[in-house]
Image: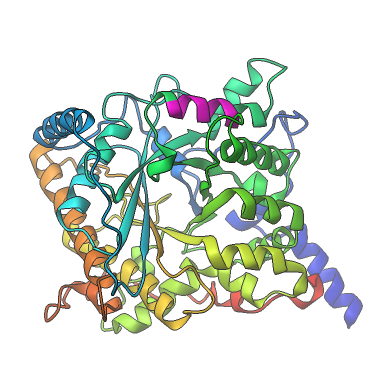
């Protein structure tokens, strides 16, 4: 019986199952794998069951738009210009009765100016906001000056600019000169950040977009090269201040039917002490891309607590697995307990890649609220073992249904306002709770929309138990 079980486990680890999971978790072959600079490639456009920020590159044909509201962009320019010449605003610090210090991380592929403005219009007094700014489309190793870090700084001392370190762009930079290394890339990125106005001392930082599935699988030199990149970003050139940053990590979709092979890959990865020790040294937010599927959420008649439980089995699965692991994952577990950040989806409207958010704007308001409700609920239930105030989301508006420019701006504005309010009221002073994500006191009505045909999935429940034969 033991030999049979061992054979089954071996076959699982080789990913003999068919479907998206086996394709993602199998050992890759082909050109580039033996390249010492290899870091993996983005999944092909349209790949099913993958949660990835790279999907925006499949659609992006021009430089990102800083705001879908032109008037807001004009106001931001004026504010940034006046802010640059004014005396720095003194940070008053958090109010003394903040139970939880919210550190909210945002990925943006466009519209970062308006996102920041909406968050600043309805802020939590207990929060710091970290907003990523995409690099120039023509050269993704170059950081933008116009609508760059200054546009975020102008929002106040609790708003921090995050430089997107685009792995695909920097991969081309490394390969352009055989003397360059991935450590060199990290150091050069830090130099360019300083030149573009990113201020580490005031809270600005960097975000790697993104660790590919080759890092998870340990294919070729991918994992070692990303360790080198992150080290260079943290250390700089010796003259710049040390800076812990953000890592966005590619994931798999909530609607995946069989998570077995993926789970075994994760278990092997969690036991790589050298890797996790490096991440603990250099990374503050480990932002796992876990973009929920609205069709695994809006089950008719289901109470929000049940929806949150289903969400969290997926949103928190790497941390849950590390908590269930043996002593061989102690380094990874310790790191994730103080850095894990579920990168949820406020990206509307996407049938895949950012989860399935191909729903109405009103449904999306509730979907975003429930994501925040779920994360905040998990925080309350695990106060000793998880990063108390870490939350992340991706903002990638997509006009899938041919709305007019005005209609699209209005509907996405409503989603941003709901996002800001949900964060404000769930991470408030004093006795705040997850209920605030569903509306201000007395108006908890924003978590109850249904989605026709929605059904819960139990595929992610297996992460609560470590696979014995891989101990």
Q: Is residue 457 visible?
A: yes
Q: Nearer the viewer, residue 404 or 74?
A: 74
For the N terminus, the quadrant is bottom right
Q: Position of residue 275 (x, y in %)?
A: 71, 51
Q: What are the residue bounds of the magenta stretch?
A: 186-194
The residue drawn where x is 38% and y is 24% is: 136
- Residue that lies at the very extreme toward the right in this rendered image: 3
Q: Is residue 55 left or right of residue 437?
A: right
Near-viewer residue (249 or 46): 249
Say which residue appears at 28% left-offset and 47% top-offset: 157
Residue at x-position 74% and y-position 61%: 268
Q: Residue 214: x percent and y percent? A: 66, 44
Q: Main secondary structure of the magenta part?
A: helix
Measuring from the top left, give residue 240's x and y in whole percent.
Answer: 53, 32
Quadrant for the C terminus in the image? bottom right
In the image, residue 338 sits, relative to residue 37, either above or below, namely below
- Is 421 included in the stretch rendered in magenta? no
């Amino acid at each position: 019986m033991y030999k049979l079980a061992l054979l089954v486990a071996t076959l699982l680890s080789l990913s003999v199952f068919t479907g998206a999971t086996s394709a993602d978790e199998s050992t890759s072959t082909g050109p580039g794998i033996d390249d010492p600079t290899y870091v993996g490639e983005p999944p092909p456009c349209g790949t099913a069951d993958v949660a990835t920020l790279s999907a925006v590159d499949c659609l992006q044909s021009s430089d990102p738009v800083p705001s879908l509201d032109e008037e807001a962009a004009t106001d931001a320019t004026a504010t940034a210009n006046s802010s640059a010449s004014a005396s720095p605003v003194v940070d008053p610090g958090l109010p003394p009765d903040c139970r939880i210090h919210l550190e909210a991380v945002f990925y943006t592929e466009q519209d970062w100016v308006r996102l920041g403005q909406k968050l600043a219009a309805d802020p939590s007094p207990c929060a710091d906001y970290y907003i990523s700014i995409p690099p120039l489309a023509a050269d993704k190793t170059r950081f933008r000056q116009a609508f760059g870090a200054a546009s975020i700084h102008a929002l106040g001392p609790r708003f921090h600019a995050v430089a997107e370190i685009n792995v695909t762009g920097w991969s081309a930079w490394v390969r352009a000169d055989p003397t360059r290394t991935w450590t060199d890339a990290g150091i050069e990125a830090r130099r360019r950040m300083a030149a573009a106005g990113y201020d580490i001392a005031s809270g600005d930082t960097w975000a790697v977009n993104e660790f590919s599935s080759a890092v998870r699988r340990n294919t070729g030199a991918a994992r070692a090269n990303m360790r080198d990149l992150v080290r260079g970003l943290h250390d700089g050139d010796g003259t710049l201040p040390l800076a812990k940053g953000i890592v966005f990590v590619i994931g798999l979709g909530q609607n995946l039917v069989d998570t077995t092979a993926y789970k075994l890959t994760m278990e092997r990865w969690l036991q790589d002490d050298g890797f996790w020790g490096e991440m603990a040294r250099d990374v503050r937010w480990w932002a796992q891309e876990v973009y929920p599927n609205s069709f695994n959420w809006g089950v008719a008649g289901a109470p929000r607590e049940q929806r949150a439980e289903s969400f969290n089995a997926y949103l928190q699965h790497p941390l849950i697995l590390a908590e269930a692991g043996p002593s061989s994952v102690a380094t990874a577990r310790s790191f994730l307990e103080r850095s894990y950040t579920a990168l949820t989806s406020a990206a509307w409207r996407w049938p895949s890649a950012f989860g399935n958010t191909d729903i109405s704007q009103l449904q999306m308001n509730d979907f975003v609220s429930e994501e925040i409700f779920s994360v905040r609920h998990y925080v309350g239930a695990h106060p000793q073992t998880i990063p108390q105030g870490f939350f992340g989301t991706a903002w990638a508006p997509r006009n899938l249904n041919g709305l007019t420019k005005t209609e699209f701006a209005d509907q996405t504005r409503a989603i941003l306002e709901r996002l800001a309010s949900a964060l404000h009221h769930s991470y408030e002073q004093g006795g705040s709770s997850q209920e605030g994500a569903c509306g201000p006191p007395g108006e908890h009505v924003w978590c109850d929309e249904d989605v026709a045909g929605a059904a819960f999935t139990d595929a992610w429940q297996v992460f609560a138990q470590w696979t014995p034969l891989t101990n």
